[in-house]
Image (cartoon, grey):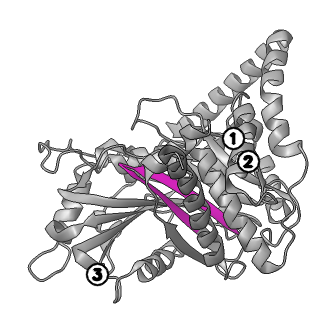
Amino acid sequence: MERLTAQDLSMLWPDDVGWPQDIGALVILDGRSLLGPDGQVRIHAVRSAIEARLHLIPHFRQRLYVPHVGLGWPLWVDAPAFDIAAHVNVLPVPAPGDDAQLLHIIEQLRSRRLDRSRPLWQMWFLPGISDGRVGLYVRVHHAIADGVAGVAALGAFLDADPRPPVTPAPHWTPAPPPSTRALLQDNLQRRRTELARALSTLAHPATATRRLRAAWPAVHETLAAGRAPRTSLNRPIGPGRTFVVVRSQLDLVRQVARAHDAKINDVLLAAIAGGLRDLLHGRGDRVDVVLRAYVPVSLHREQPGQARGNLDGMMAVPLPIGVPDPLLRLWLIAAETAERRKRSRPAGGTLLRSGLVQRAFLRLMAHQRWANAYVANVPGPAVPLYFAGAPVVEVFPVVPLIGNITLGVGALSYADQFNITTVADLDECPDVEVFVQGIRDALGSLAGSQLRSTSGA
């Protein structure tokens, strides 16, 4: 019986107030081997290839079950019937099949609510891109996976070999949902365990105090260390989104980071700070401020590719957008994050273990002053991969928005690429291209400084 964790559960409530928490990826495939003589996606073969891997991700054949009051938290149960055609489909991209058309299709698909009576995921194949490429939009509810676990789930369908050995999938028979009696017994046992844990904490106050002291700096940093400045970035979000992508080279970003004793994520944050500076300047807002970005920190300790569920802490990073020099911004951000990475971070579910408290906290999100923007950077596959024999050309992450955070950024490395996706509220960020161009300019300046340094100029 697999109940949702507290952190999994916190991903469900935003759906009810119009902030769907779906994560995803846009995968660009060299899709010529996936197309038939008529140019159409060979959907039956593609569905068969996907269905053969579903045993590697049990939640992809399970649905969310919410028991009656008194029977405990929601849990995952096998879907009584599973139809792959309800989850894997095709939608052609209109001509001319460029990035703008492709990303517009992604928004159309993202805006459709996932059906909670079915497993909470979808895949859409998107033919019609130039040069025989085919897009693949993979969408998973955040209650199933965070960014690292999402990459692991995607990896279950990818291979390092274009012709991997064919292994038959094990036969799947759906298990019946647990009875009311089993749910009640499980809930009582969990409550006993929580009570025993609480009593153990009271019996060992010194240990509890040490843990609290270890976690407090990170909690204080996130929720109590000052308020984010008021800017036009923070307005209640609506239902629409717009997406823009930025392509970059991982090796160049890595060289910049190494040259300045920074991390790849610091380079990303410095570039984002440049984009925010340009965006707010273009709006006539003040730029002599220090913004705050919320950055999830993965706490997964599984082997690569084995992560499941949600297990993140949160880091609040100051972004000194008042500093015009991209290199100085990088140094300042790297110094801040170096200190913050030393802090022990509790998982998000540790702080809000009650569903009632989570829902109450959610009501504050439309007016929160903890963060101005959201930035998620997830390491992806380090080698070129294939889907059903089709080479994976590019991968872009898709992150959700919540509350009054109108701008979110996802970054994902793949092979020699470092790709960035900006997700913006459609109504509140009509000028998102200014922000994206600012990111490109900042990355170009940082890369240029590195090239000048290595050439001795």
The residue furthest front is 457
Mark 3 Cα within 10 Å, few/some/many (few <14, many 20+)? many
- Residue behind mark 3: 128
Q: Earlier in the sequence, mark 1 or mark 2?
A: 1
Q: Which residues are magenta?
A: 406-422
Relative to 95, residue 290 above or below: above
Residue depicted at x 23% and y 63%: 47
Residue 349 is drawn in which quadrant? top right
Residue depicted at x 81% and y 53%: 361
Q: Secondary structure at mark 1?
A: helix
Mark 2 Cα within 10 Å, few/some/many (few <14, many 20+)? some
Residue depicted at x 28% and y 81%: 128
Q: Secondary structure at mark 3?
A: loop
- Residue behind mark 1: 334
Q: Amino acid at mark 3?
A: Gly
Relative to 93, residue 24 above or below: above
Q: CA distance from mark 1 to mark 2?
A: 36 Å
Q: Is residue 15 magenta?
A: no
Tell me: 222 left or right of 177: right
Residue 199 is drawn in which quadrant? top right
Q: Is residue 416 magenta?
A: yes
Q: CA distance from mark 2 to mark 3?
A: 44 Å
Q: Tell me the chief SS of the magenta region.
A: strand
Q: Earlier in the sequence, mark 2 or mark 3?
A: 3
- Residue behind mark 2: 355
Of 350 and 427, nearer the camera is: 427
Q: Amino acid at mark 1?
A: Ala
Residue 272 in the image: x percent, y percent? Answer: 65, 59
Q: Which is more foreground, mark 2 or mark 3?
A: 3
